[in-house]
Image (tube, rainbow, N blue to C red):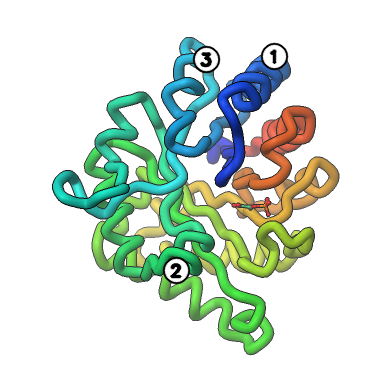
Amino acid sequence: MRKPIVLGNWKLNGTTAASEALVASILAGLIEWDAVDVGVCPPFILIPQVIHQAAHTNLAVGGQSCSEYVLGAYTGEVSADMLREVGCRYVLVGHSERRALFGETNEMVARKVNIALKSGLTPVLCVGETLEERQSGRMNDVVRGQIQAVLNVVGIRSFERLVIAYEPIWAIGTGLTASPAQAQSMHAMIRGVLSEHDPAVARGVRIQYGGSVKADNAAELFAEPDIDGGLIGGASLKAEDFLIICRAAADSLRFI
Ligand code: PEP
């Protein structure tokens, strides 16, 4: 059984008051804890507050990134150990905005996954292709390369302890969503790459879809056999929409 997982990526949004109101609404509406894992990834500064508010609930909290370093003279960085110490369960690694805007390479992403695993966090490894890469038919090679770079550093068995998020870059924040068939095809490809190393690990790893998932398209995406929930940006800032998406994921729970 692969339990679906829905994570909200708040990006650079939220004030103390807005975050408190959003988390309160999510906690008030969230049910079916057994059928779906749910978490939110606030900006670093809001994480302790959200962890405090979500204490003794099943709402997990994650970071949106972490340093590739453990400690030392790295001004502005936040380490995986620090996230773990304040109570985070997850950390997003290699989100396309980090790759495109902050120069994160496949090798850096692999080092971050490694360090997150060592700290006891569950890394959410984000992969995905640009529109140009899709249109030129290179999307499978690009995503395979992103996965392979991590495999090279942490090995296949570590994929038992992480989550993958397939996020086509052309679908993030654009309102364009990959069709269920396009997403399913890529998810199956990713599982196939892992299966070349260890079929059991490949069967067990959870692969989220991300990219303009909304309340009205979540169910059809999550119905695909290799899609195990979603990484949600914009729609995670509206409790009502986020809860509908969580419900759709819970309803997609199936046995494999
Ligand atoms: C994301 O930021 O990971 C994301 C998928 O954003 P959106 O849902 O807004 O496309």
Packing grade of label 1 (10 A; few <14, some 14-19, many >=20) is few
Q: Which residue is mark 2?
A: 193
C-beta proximity under 8 Å, tags 1 and 3: no
Percent from the top left, x then y, of residue 198? 36, 59
Quadrant for residue 79, please give it. top left
Task: Name the secondary structure under disc 1.
Answer: helix
Query: Going by the image, does 208 lie left or right of 22?
Result: left
- In front of the other: 176 or 224: 176
Q: Is residue 236 above or below residue 164?
A: above
Q: Amino acid at mark 1?
A: Ala
Give the image location of residue 137, x and y in percent.
62, 86
Q: Nearer the viewer, residue 46 or 161?
A: 46
Label 2 is placed on what type of residue?
Val
> Which label was assigned to residue 53?
3
Quadrant where the C terminus lies? top right
Q: Along the polypeptide, which appears first: circle 1 or circle 2? A: 1
Answer left or right for 91 relative to 68.
Answer: right
Q: What SS does tag 2 mark?
A: helix
Task: Give residue 133's position: percent from left, percent from top.
Answer: 60, 82
Q: Which residue is mark 1?
A: 28
